[in-house]
Image (spheres, rainbow, N blue to C red):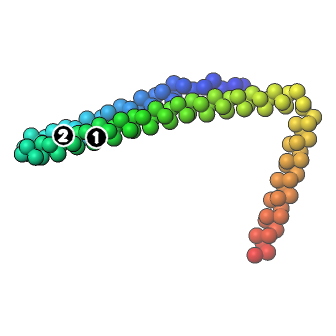
Amino acid sequence: MDKPLDTNSTNNTHNTFSRGVDSASGSMHRAIDSAADAASPAIKQMTARAHNTVDKMANGATHAADALATKSTQLHQLQHQLTEGTRAQVRSHPLMSLGIALAGGALFSLWLSRRSGSSNAG
């Protein structure tokens, strides 16, 4: 019943994103270099700054991807903990769980019936 955490999927997504960032960064660097080869020293200084900016952007995107991968793993672990905690509570108190479910369903039904009644009146 329990689904194991799919860390391979998260890692594959992260690796794919990192390869895409590296590829885009490399393409931008090549375009900057080709423009710089045909330019004056002032333009070469600007291209060096452009390279620096591209590197900063690539580093930022990689850092964001790392942070997302970490948060994704943490959320999967939290989901697993909450699911297991809920299962344990239902198993240890089945009648109370049934009562809470019935009461929640009744309240939800009441809320929906009042909501649909008020939308028909307007």
Say whether marks 2 and 1 touch (CB < 8 Å). Answer: no
Q: Is residue 32 visible?
A: no
Nearer the N terminus, badge 2 or badge 1? 2
Q: Quadrant of residue 71?
A: top right
Quarter-wise, where is residue 53 in the image? top left
Seen at 84% across and 55% down, the residue is: 109
Residue 25 in the image, given as x and y percentages of width and height: 28, 37
Q: Nearer the viewer, residue 17 or 120?
A: 17
**Which residue has dot 1 on it?**
54
Q: Quadrant of residue 120?
A: bottom right
- Above-or-below relation of 42 to 119: above
Q: Position of residue 22 (x, y in %)?
A: 32, 33
Residue 62 rendering spot, x and y as whole percentages: 40, 34
Callout 2: SS: helix
Q: Please tell me which residue is depicted at 79% across the width and 75% down the height of the picture.
A: 121
Task: Give the residue type at disc 1.
Answer: Val
Say what amino acid the circle numbered 2 marks.
Ala
Residue 4: mark: none
Relative to 50, does residue 15 appear above or below in the rendering? Answer: above
Kindly report which numbered mark, 2 or 1, lies closer to the viewer in this rendering.
Answer: 2
Per the image, the residue denoted by label 2 is: 48
Q: Is residue 94 left or right of residue 42?
A: right
Indicate the quadrant containing the N terminus: top left, top right, bottom left or bottom right. top right
Near mark 1 (Cα within 10 A), the count class, few <14, some 14-19 or many ≥20, is some
Q: Nearer the viewer, residue 22 or 1?
A: 22
Q: Can residue 99 be seen here?
A: yes
What residue is drawn where x is 82% and y is 59%? 111
In the picture, measured across the screen, residue 27 lies left or right of residue 78, that is left
Cα gap from disc 2 to disc 1, whole angstroms: 10 Å
Give residue 98's position: percent from left, percent from top.
89, 38
